[in-house]
Image (cartoon, grey):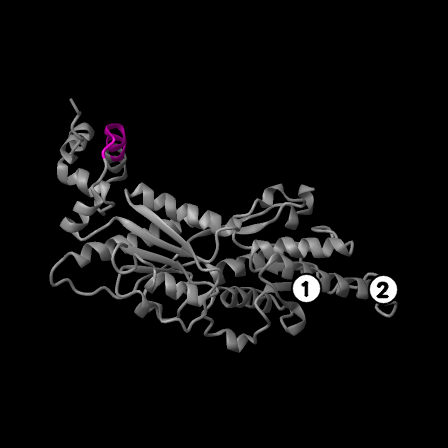
Amino acid sequence: MATSKPTLRDVAAAAGVSPMTASNALRGKTGVKESTRAKVLAAAKKLDYRINLTASMLKSGRSNIIHVIVNEFDSPFYSKLTQALSNEIVARGLTPFIEQTRYSADAAAHALTSNPFSGQLFDGEILHATGLGTNLPLAKLNGGRPFVLVDACEETPTVDAVNFPNEEAERAAAQHLIDHGCRKIAIVGHAFTKRADLAHAQNAFLLRLRGACNALLDAGLPYDETTVFEAGSAEDGIAAGHAIAQQILATRGNADVGEGADPPFDGVCCANDFAAFGVIRGLADHGIRVPQDVQVIGFDGVTSGSYATPSLSTIEVDLNQLAKFALDMIAERVERRGEEDAEPLPPSRATIGYQLVERESTAPHLL
């Protein structure tokens, strides 16, 4: 005789909660304590309870599926970001559906409008906006579904957004070099932009440039076209490292400068870890040592920097906090969507935390 399938009431009884609480926990609703949610999920797993997705959608209008769109899968940063978002989605009893855009605005538009499930299956969507430009009408393409942009950096948010601490953290990175005695610091990331033109920066690299620029100028250190190198990838970082090294070597070989003259650069503040690793390689190609000759710091903190030689000092951003903020925003809008006569929520914005991790690339005493 076939064993009957477990029901929601069976799960609730096994977890010691009411059926309503069990339902809310399994569907990732807010207002359920994490300890209670964990008990319900454990009971559901033990009983091999499966939500009937079709019946659930017909009854509640929800699928419990969250659409995640990132630029790429095959990099340490996006691997960590996707992992953090996926873990948080699953922890709330929801299911992630993940796509990549390869930095293409057309691919992002396709994911939001032409995916076979768009507009029908997803309860909410999360899109990493960096590299997609500012002309893509994302809020319109999304069709009104709960939607969170990661690192949108808009001065006036048009949709919910969770941003990296771009300006504040990069300023801290530059200040770290200053505190370590650096007096001629190269900034590697966005192309040179005048300080006045940075006032209305609306992308991550420009905001990071503004943070580093302000730290240098406030310390009375130079910021001009000669101190800024455009690079976002490891390959571009290598080229920047070569250019910085060549200036250092030119100064060393100039007899008119004289011995004991200050080098043209003694620190490099990078907009991401990939560029920082490239810079270190580019400097090494010309015999410039890190950190003995030049100190280098990155941004992101998601690469295996502690295993490189030298290990990379960096700004480590809190991706787990980012995931929690993003899912909280989606959950709030999903809940309000089911309320009659609910007032529309204005777009919200949150900025995640960070910590500066000092390693060998800015600490000669660690070598």
Q: Position of residue 25 (x, y in %)?
A: 22, 41
Can you tell which quarter of the image residue 253 is in? bottom right
Marks 2 and 1, how far apart at CA: 18 Å
Q: Earlier in the sequence, mark 2 or mark 1?
A: 1
Residue 126 percent across, percent down from the top left: 35, 57
Crowdedness near tag 2: few (<14), some (14–19) or many (≥20) residues, C-alpha within 10 Å: few
Residue with the most extreme top position: 1
Instruction: Report the residue that reaches farthest toward the front.
Output: 1
Kindly identify which residue carries mark 2.
Answer: 253
Task: Report the disc number at residue 306.
Answer: none
When the figure is inspected, residue 185 is found, relative to residue 33, above or below; the finding is below
Which residues, given as a range, are shown in magenta?
A: 41-49
Q: Is residue 172 left or right of residue 363?
A: left
* Neighbourhood count class around disc 1 (C-alpha, 10 Å): few under 14, some 14–19, many 20 upward: many
Frontmost of labels 2 and 1 is 2
Query: What residue is rendered at 50% in x and 58% in y?
Result: 169
User: Tag 2, which secondary structure?
Assistant: loop
Q: Quadrant of the N terminus?
A: top left
Disc number placed over residue 184 in the picture, else none: 1
- The reply to whether discs 2 and 1 touch (Cβ–Cβ < 8 Å) is no
Horizontal and vertical percent position of residue 101: 45, 60
Q: Quadrant of the C terminus?
A: top right
